[in-house]
């Protein structure tokens, strides 16, 4: 018998795959069959498992706590944008011990010291990488001082890398661009941090941060929405030790005031501070304007002005 050609064999394989894919659920007759995370064929309508392909894609070892998991793991850390080399280079441990935990000889210790020194030197091959390393370390320092999550640091590092590739750093300080990238990342991730708070942990003036932020957001096309004052309410109320009732009332005051157009052109931190001050009075948990102003880092005049507008908007006299 003549053997089938390669093309005919491929056609048969394709037909066989299509027949396998055209599976109907024997329970409800639906053809909405999907493969879930455990590699099982499941009907989307009734949930019947049609085929089990139990392939364990995890490690072959078991661990019951963090220390066991760390000791048995044979892989490194994931790729991260917060390091100039994305964490792909190797490091030499500072402990002068071998694989069995025994101390090294003086000759070996001297050799490892030289190796560590050269390992640190070759991590950055030129001035551009050294500048990137410094900028990312600044972002990490400021993010730690602000207490923002890891995702914000990753986004800030990506924004800085984009600015570097677009040659937006020329003529500007590295600290200014890195601070502006961090502030943009906070706004993009919905983490409420005011420009004053960012300027406190930075080494550049607030005016330069704002100017650089506007420049890179325009050049990189960062579509950032205006900051919602309600994002500041939980943090300010927590610092003032106010109850959930005050937070809920402050949110209501902001919503009513914003519907009447009072939010346009106003500072979100000052607007949130005034709403918290008004809510504390309405809920009999009075806080002085000075206390609220210190937490929100605004002036008492700002709180008084926004407070009068919000009270009128709520219909109180």
Image: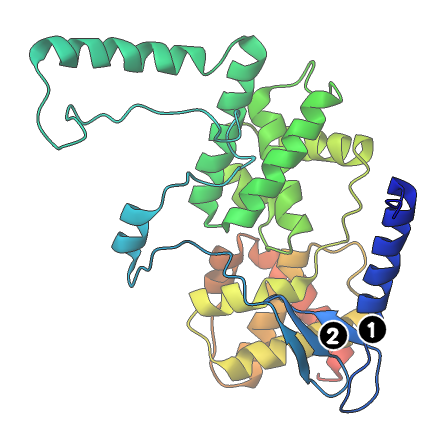
264 over 29 or under it: above or below: above
Q: Are marks 2 and 1 in contact (CB under 8 Å)?
A: yes
Spatial distance from mark 2 to mark 1, Cα to Cα? 6 Å
* Residue bearing mark 2: 255
Work out which quarter of the rendered image holds the C terminus and state it. bottom right
**Camera sees residue 243:** yes
**Camera sees residue 201:** no
Mark 2 Cα within 10 Å, few/some/many (few <14, many 20+)? some
**In terms of secondary structure, where does tag 2 sit?**
helix
Q: Position of residue 315 (x, y in %)?
A: 76, 84
Say which residue appears at 81% left-offset and 58% top-offset. 264
Count of picture labels: 2
Q: Position of residue 186 (x, y in %)?
A: 61, 48
Left or right side of 220 for 163: left
247 over 268 or under it: above or below: below
**Please, which residue is most extreme toward the bottom here?**
27
Say which residue appears at 56% left-offset and 35% top-offset. 81
């Amino acid at each position: 018998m003549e053997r089938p050609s390669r093309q005919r064999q491929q056609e048969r394989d394709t037909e066989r795959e299509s027949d396998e894919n055209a599976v109907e659920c024997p329970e409800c007759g639906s053809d909405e069959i999907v493969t879930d995370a455990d590699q099982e064929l499941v009907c989307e309508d009734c949930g019947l498992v049609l085929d089990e392909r139990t392939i364990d894609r995890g490690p072959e070892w078991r661990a019951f706590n963090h220390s066991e998991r760390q000791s048995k793991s044979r892989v490194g850390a994931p790729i991260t944008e917060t390091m100039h080399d994305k964490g792909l280079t190797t490091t030499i441990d500072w402990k002068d011990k071998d694989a069995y935990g025994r101390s090294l000889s003086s000759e070996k210790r001297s050799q490892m010291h030289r190796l560590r020194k050269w390992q640190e030197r070759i991590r950055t091959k030129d001035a551009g990488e050294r500048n990137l390393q410094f900028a990312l370390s600044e972002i990490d320092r400021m993010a730690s001082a602000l207490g923002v999550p890891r995702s914000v640091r990753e986004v800030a590092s990506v924004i800085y890398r984009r600015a570097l590739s677009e040659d937006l750093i020329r003529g500007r300080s590295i600290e200014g661009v890195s601070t502006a990238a961090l502030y943009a990342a906070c706004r993009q991730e919905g983490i409420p941090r005011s420009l004053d708070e960012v300027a406190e942990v930075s080494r550049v003036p607030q005016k330069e941060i704002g100017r650089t932020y506007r420049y890179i957001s325009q050049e990189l096309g960062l579509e950032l929405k205006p900051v919602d004052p309600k994002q500041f309410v939980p943090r300010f109320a927590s610092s003032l030790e106010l109850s959930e009732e005050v937070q809920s009332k402050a949110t209501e005051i902001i919503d009513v005031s914003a519907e009447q157009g009072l939010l346009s052109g106003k500072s979100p931190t000052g607007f949130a501070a005034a709403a918290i001050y008004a809510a504390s009075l309405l809920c009999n948990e009075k806080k002085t304007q000075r206390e609220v102003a210190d937490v929100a880092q605004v002036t008492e005049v700002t709180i008084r002005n926004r407070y009068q507008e919000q009270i009128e908007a709520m219909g109180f006299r």
